[in-house]
Image (cartoon, rainbow, N blue to C red):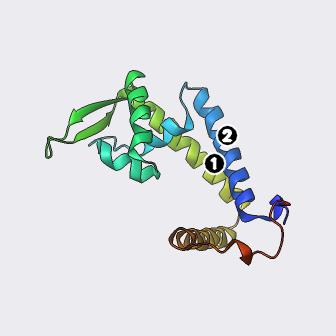
């Protein structure tokens, strides 16, 4: 099986292209796609518990800690004790963080509008359905032992 015939190749290459596009836009404003995604996941008015951000993004808390420290140093966020649970910390956006969040949201909206101009609603429904099924396959793979001998064709020429 050629790599161009694999599902993951197309997902990965599309995501890398999207990520490069988002990073180019973010770089013009002196931040990154990763920072933009964190900003999007912080409630602009009420803040967001620090422990809730990583799961929203599919990250582990350790990965996010360094990024939050960096964002705080850049003046994009600030931390305050949670008024209900004093053991917890809430993350809030600074005015600059709100501005960069809006840039991130606008960039995502523009990309999605451009895709929707080219791709019909029916094609998008099919696309989303296929991704739903791919996620089901991933969940099954994560919960089972995979039989590597089940493949008839060579994968990547191995």
Q: Please say if 73 is above or below 130.
A: above
What percent of the width, then of the height, locates residue 115? 68, 55
Where on the picture, by quarter, is residue 9? bottom right
Evaluate whether residue 98 shows in this view: no
What percent of the width, then of the height, locates residue 114? 67, 51
Instruction: Please tell me whether mark 1 sits on a helix, a strand or a loop.
Output: helix
Say which residue appears at 45% left-offset and 48% top-offset: 59
What percent of the width, then of the height, locates residue 139? 53, 70
- Image position of 32 (left or right of 68): right
- Image position of 12 (left or right of 56): right
- Image position of 134 (left or right of 119): left
Say which residue appears at 40% left-offset and 53% top-offset: 55
In the picture, the quarter occupied by the N terminus is bottom right
Comes first in the chain, label 1 or label 2: 2
Where on the picture, by quarter, is residue 4? bottom right
- Image position of 42 (left or right of 36): left
* Label 1, label 2: how far apart the Cα atoms are: 9 Å
Q: Which residue is mark 1?
A: 111
Q: Which residue is mark 2?
A: 21
Say which residue appears at 15% left-offset and 45% top-offset: 85
The crowd level at tag 2 (other Cα within 10 Å; few <14, some 14-19, many 20+) is: some
Instruction: Please tell me whether mark 2 sits on a helix, a strand or a loop.
Output: helix
Where on the picture, by quarter, is residue 44? top left
Say which residue appears at 41% left-offset and 52% top-offset: 56
Task: Determine whether label 1 and label 2 are within 8 Å by CB.
Answer: yes
Q: Please say if 48 is above or below 27.
A: below
Q: Nearer the viewer, residue 132 or 64?
A: 64
């Amino acid at each position: 099986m050629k790599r161009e015939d694999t599902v993951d190749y197309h997902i990965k290459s599309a995501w890398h292209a999207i990520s490069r596009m988002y990073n180019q836009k973010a770089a013009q404003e002196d931040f990154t796609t990763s920072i933009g995604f964190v900003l999007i996941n912080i409630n602009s008015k009420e803040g967001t518990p620090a422990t809730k951000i990583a799961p929203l993004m599919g990250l582990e808390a350790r990965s996010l800690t360094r990024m939050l420290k960096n964002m705080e140093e850049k003046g994009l966020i600030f931390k305050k004790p949670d008024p209900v649970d004093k053991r917890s910390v809430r993350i809030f956006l600074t005015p600059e963080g709100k501005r960069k969040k809006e840039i991130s949201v606008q960039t995502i909206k523009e990309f999605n509008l451009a895709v929707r101009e080219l791709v019909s609603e029916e094609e998008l429904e099919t696309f989303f359905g296929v991704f739903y099924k791919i996620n089901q396959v991933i969940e099954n793979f994560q919960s089972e032992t995979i039989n590597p001998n089940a493949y008839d064709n060579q994968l990547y020429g191995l």
